[in-house]
Every structure is written in C-alpha cells, then in structure tokens.
Amino acid sequence: MNVFETLAEPNRRRILTLLCERERSAGEIGRALSISQPGVSKHLRLLREAGLVTVRSEAQTRIYRLRADPLSEVDVWLEPYRRFWG
C-alpha cells in the first residue's frame, strides 16, 4: 500500500495527527480515538508498512512515532494545486 492509499482512511490520518503531538503507545491511541485494540493494531501495521510510523519497544510496550519523510511525496503531488489556495 502506498502513502496515498494509506492516508485515504480517516482513522489513519487521525492517528498521524496524534503522533504529531508526541510518541504514543497503541493503547493510548486506541483510547484517544475510541478505536478497538485490533483496529488500532491494523492501522498501525499499515502506517508502518507505508513508512509513516516507526515503532520501538519500551519494556512490554510498543511506542509509535511519526516518520514524516514519506509525506514529502504528498507535498510534491500537491504543489501544482497550491496556486488555487491563494
């Protein structure tokens, strides 16, 4: 799944918005967004596969962090449309 397909799902965009603020565990994300643990895990897996998040272990908790580099692809795609916003 590419970055655009990954971002098409609203809950994945909501997860990225949360991760813009700070690193979070899957449990924190689920509670903040009222998404079930299996749902959060699925979304985080797809975000990892697209390169939009990284994960590290802290004891028995997995901590997720935004990796914004792949969003540059979206920025490049949006460039021709910026003139319509001004």
Image (tube, grey):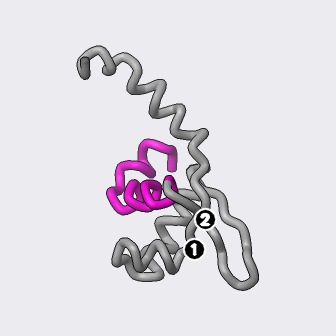
Label 2: which secondary element: strand
Q: Report the magenta residues as a range.
A: 1-20
Query: Please, what is the three-letter code of the amino acid marked with disc 2?
Result: Tyr
Residue at mark 2: 64
Q: Which mark is residue 40?
A: none
Membership of 46 in magenta stretch: no
Residue 26 position in % (x across, y down): 54, 75
In the image, taking residue 54 as reference, residue 52 lies left or right, namely left
- Give the vertical position of 38 relative to 7 (above or below): below
- Element assignment for label 1: strand
* Mark pair 2, 1: CA separation: 6 Å
Residue 65 image point, x, y percent: 61, 59
Label 2 environment density (alpha carbons within 10 Å; few <14, some 14–19, many ≥20):
many
- At x 36%, y 62%, the residue is 11
Residue at x 39%, y 54% (from the top left corner): 13
Discs 2, 1 touching: Cβ within 8 Å: yes
Mark 1: give few (<14), some (14-19) or many (20+) Cα within 10 Å.
some
Q: Amino acid at mark 1?
A: Ser
Query: What label sits on residue 25 in the rendered view?
Result: 1
